[in-house]
Image (cartoon, grey):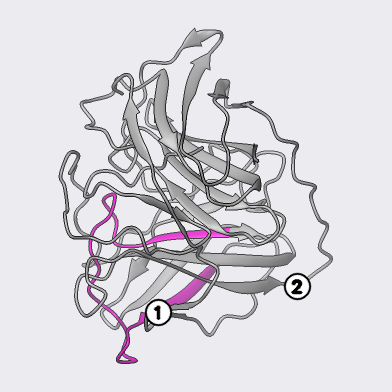
Amino acid sequence: MSFTSRIAPRRRTLVAAGTAVVLAVTLAACGSSKDSDSSMPGMDHGAHPSASSSSPSASASGMDHGHGSTSGMDHGGMDHAGMGDGLADTKDGYKLTSTATELPAGKDSAYSFQITGPDGKPVTAFAVDQTKRMHFYAVRADLTGFQHLHPSMTDDGTWTAALTALQPGTWRTYASFTPDDGPGKGKDFVLSRTVTVPGAAEKTPLPQATTSTEVDGYTVTVKGVLMAGMAHPATVSISKDGEPVTDLQPYLDTYAHLTAFHEGDQAFAHLHPETKVTGDHGGPDLSFQAMLPKPGNWRMFLQFQTGGKLHTAALTLSVS
C-alpha cells in the first residue's frame, strides 16, 4: 500500500527494495502545504510526543525554490524506476557523505551532509520534486521515531537537516533527490547512512499488522489485499467521528504523502498519488493500485493535512 506526496512536478513510479514498484493512484475526491517532519505517537523517539508535531522545515536559503503548486505537470524523461531500496550510500557514482557518526540523545541536533557526483565533487544542482529539492528522513532501527524534513543547502552543496531530539539507538538517515545536472540528471536517488545515538537503547516492538489506525481524532482505514510482486487495487479512507473527511488540503502538492519501511532491513519505499490537486477538498477515499516487491511487514507513515495542520498516521501492513 502506498501513496506519498511526490506528485506535482512529476508523475512517478514507485520503486522499493530494488524492484520497480508501479503505483498508479487516482484520488476519488479532491482535497496545505506545510514543510515539516513528523514523529509518531507512542513510538516517538523525537522531541515531539504527538504525531501532528512537526519541526519547521528549513527552506534552502537561496536554493530551495519552487514552492509553488505544480500539480498536473508531467516531467517526462525523469527516471523513477531505478531508485533502489535506499539501503546504500552510493549508487551510479552518486554518494551520500557525512562526517557525523553520532548524534546526541535527548536534544535537537543538526545533521549535515553532501551529495557528491561521479566526478567526486559536491552536487549543487537538484531538481524540484514535490516542491522540494531534497527530502530527508530519519528512522530508528526498530522503525520508530519517524522524521521527514526538508533541509537547507549552502552554496557549497552542504545540506543541514534540523532533527528533533533522538532517543538512543541506531538510526538510518535517507536523502531522496534528483540531480538537475550531470550524468544522473532526471534520475531519482535514495541514499542512506546510519548514525548512532549513544545511550541505553530499548527496542520498541513493531505494532501488529492492522488495516486501521487513528491519529489526532482521524481514522485511517486500508481496504485491499497486498501481495509481493503483484499489483492490487486498494483504498485508503479517512474519517473523523464516523464521518467521511472531505477537506484534505494539498501537502507537498498532493493530498497524501506516504513513506514505507520494510521490517528487518529498513528498505525504503516512497509512494504517492498521481492526481491533479484542485483545492482543499480531498478525501475521503484514496484509490490506487500498488505493488510492493518484498513480502513481510511494512511500516507505513501517511502524512495528510487539514486546517493547516499536518497529521502523520502510522500502521503496519503485511505483504504476503
Q: Quadrant of residue 32?
A: top left
Neighbours of disc 2 within 10 Å: few (<14), some (14-19), many (20+)? some
Between 97 and 183, which is closer to the camera in this rendering? 183
Up the image or down, 239 lies above or below 206; here it is above
Classify residue 94 as left or right of residue 64.
right
Mark before the other along the chain sequence, 2 or 1: 1
Classify residue 17 as left or right of residue 308.
right
The circle on residue 137 is: none
Local SS, label 1: strand
Amino acid type for the residue under numbered disc 2: Pro
- Where is residue 44 shown, x and y percent of the image? 67, 47
Residue lying at the far front of the rendered structure: 230
Up the image or down, 198 lies above or below 147; here it is below
Task: Let me know if residue 148 is in the magenta part.
Answer: no
The circle on residue 198 is: 2
- Which image quarter is the C terminus in? top right
Neighbours of disc 1 within 10 Å: few (<14), some (14-19), many (20+)? many
Q: Which residue is mark 1?
A: 114
Between 173 and 21, which is closer to the camera in this rendering? 21
Which span of residues is magenta-colored? 110-138
Residue at the location (37% across, 24% down)? 248
